[in-house]
Image: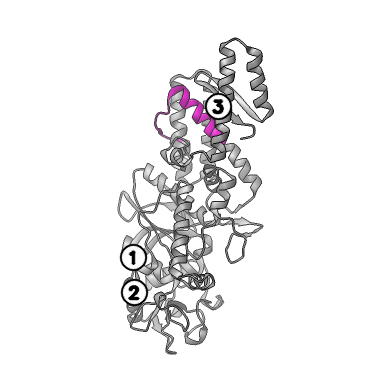
Amino acid sequence: MRLYDSATRDTTDLVPVVPGQVSIYHCGLTVQGPPHLGHIRKEVVFDVLRRWLERAGYEVTIIANVTDVDDKIIAKGREQGRPWYAVAYENERALHAAYEVLGCTAPTYEPRATGHVPEMIEMMQTLIERGHAYAADDGSGDVYFDVRSWPAYGALSNQKVDEMQAAEDAPPEGKRDPRDFALWKGSKAGEPETASWPTPWGRGRPGWHLECSAMAAKYLGHEFDIHGGGLDLRFPHHENELAQSSAAGQAFARRWMHNAMLNLGGAKMSKSVGNTLSVSEVVKRFPAIAVRYYLLAAHYRSVIEYSEEALAETAVAVERITGFVTRAAELVGPGEPGEVPAEFAAAMDDDLAVPAALAILNGSVTRGNGQLATGGPELAATLAEVRGMLDVLGVDPLSPVWVARGGASGADAALDSLIGDLLDQRATARADKDFAAADRVRDQLTAAGIEIEDTPHGPRWTVKGQ
C-alpha cells in the first residue's frame, strides 16, 4: 500500500513501525459545538483507511482525541449560563451520534485532554530542561515553546520562521518571540477554577497543541505510523505538535495524512465563519448512507464543494447500488461480503484512490443488473464481490450497521403500511381474476409517484426518482 506523506510531499510504501500493525492518531473535535459535515469528512476518510488496512490483514489502532477544555468552550459556557464541562460533554455526545449515524467505527480509544494533564506537565518539564520551552516571566503562569530553539520548525508546512505571523494563542507580552506558541495557559481572573489544574508554574489549562503530543505518546508510543487530520490543521497545530514532540526526543509520526476541506459557498466549512451544516440536519434531508457515500466519493486530498444538487445525485446513485443488492439478495440470498476485484484493490492501494475504486464497483453493479433475469451462481458471485467492495467503503446496505440504523421513520412506516394494504388489494383482485380492479390499484399508485415491480418474491415498490 502506498500513501501520500504531507511532510515529504511524496507517495511511498507504507512500512509500519511494528510489522502487521498500523498505529494512527488523528485530531478529534474541539467540542465547543456539535460536529458539522466538514468535521465528519475526516472521520469518514480515516474510517475507510482503517477498513482497508484491516481487510489487508493489519491490526489497526486508532486514537482520536477530544479537546474538552479550551477558550471557546469556556466562552460558550459563559454565554449559555452553564458549566463549561456540560457544554463540552453535550457536544461530545453529538460527535458520537454523528459517528454512529454515518456508520463510522469508533476509535480504539478517544482520550480527553482533561484526563491527561500529568502527561502534559511531564512533557513541559522535559522541554524546559532541554532548552526548548520556558515559563513566562510576567507571572501569568503561561509556558511557551521557543520556536527559534528548534531549527526544523516550519518543515511540515514548508515555511520559514521569519516569514511566519505571530501566534495568536496568547498575548505577546510574556513571549520571547511573537511566534512562540503556548504549551500551557495560566488562569485568568473571572475564569472558572474547575477549568484549571496546578502546575509548577501556576494553575492553568493545556494549550491546544500540547495535549495531542502527550496523548499520542501515551497511547501509541514515541514513534507511530500515521498522524492525520484536516488540511487546515497542518499549520499551526500539526507543525507545533511535530516540533514539541521532536524537541522532547521523540521520533513521533512516520507519516502525515491530511484530507482536503469540504467547502460551502467557496469557503472552508467553519464555525467561526458561520457557514456550517450540522450532520444531524443533513441526515434529515438525505439518507445517512448517501451522505457517507458523498463524503468518501471524492479523493481524500481533493476539495469537495458542497451542494444540495450533488448530494441528491449521490442519493440516486446509492439507490441504484442498494436496489441491485436488495434484488440480488432476494434471488440468491444475501451471502457474505466476498473478495474484492484486483482492480479495486489496486486503486485502494494507490493512496486510497476511491474514485477509481468506485468505477470498478459501479461496473460490477451494471454487470450484476444484467444477471438478475437469470440469477444463479454468477449472480451470487457478483453480489459477493459488490458487497465486498461496499464493506470496505462502509456502505453495504445489508451490513448490520445499516440494517440496525436504517429503520423507517414514522412517515415512512405509515407510507409502507398504506401501500402494503393497496398491494394486498391488488393481489386479491388478481387472484380473483379481476384484472381491471388490479390495474386500477396499480394506476392509483403510479399516479402517486409509486413504481411497482413484480418479482418472484412478490411486488416491490419504490418512489420515483429514489
Please name the residue that numbered disc 3 is placed on: 420
What's the amino acid at mark 2? Met
Q: How crowded is the residue under tag 3: few (<14 C-alpha within 10 Å), some, or many (20+)? A: some
Asked if the stretch drawn in magenta spans residue 439, the answer is: no
Quadrant of image for the C terminus: top right
Q: Magenta segment, which residues?
A: 319-342
Q: Secondary structure at mark 3?
A: helix
Distance between mark 3 and mark 1 Cα atoms: 57 Å
Of residues 117 and 434, the one drawn nearer to the viewer in this rendering? 434
Of residues 328 and 429, the one drawn nearer to the viewer in this rendering? 429
Q: Position of residue 207 (x, y in %)?
A: 44, 74
Q: Which of the numbered marks, if any, corresponds to residue 217? A: 1
Q: How crowded is the residue under tag 1: few (<14 C-alpha within 10 Å), some, or many (20+)? A: some
What's the amino acid at mark 1? Ala
What's the amino acid at mark 3? Gly
Q: Residue at x 58, y 30 (%)?
A: 418
Q: How crowded is the residue under tag 2: few (<14 C-alpha within 10 Å), some, or many (20+)? A: many
Q: Position of residue 111 (x, y in %)?
A: 37, 62
Q: Residue at x 47, y 68 (%)?
A: 237
Q: Main secondary structure of the magenta part?
A: helix
In the rendered view, would you say 260 is above or below 319? Answer: below
Q: Earlier in the sequence, mark 3 or mark 1?
A: 1
Asked if the stretch drawn in magenta spans residue 332, the answer is: yes
Please name the residue that numbered disc 2 is placed on: 123
Q: Position of residue 356 (x, y in %)?
A: 53, 41
Q: Earlier in the sequence, mark 2 or mark 1?
A: 2
Q: Secondary structure at mark 1?
A: helix
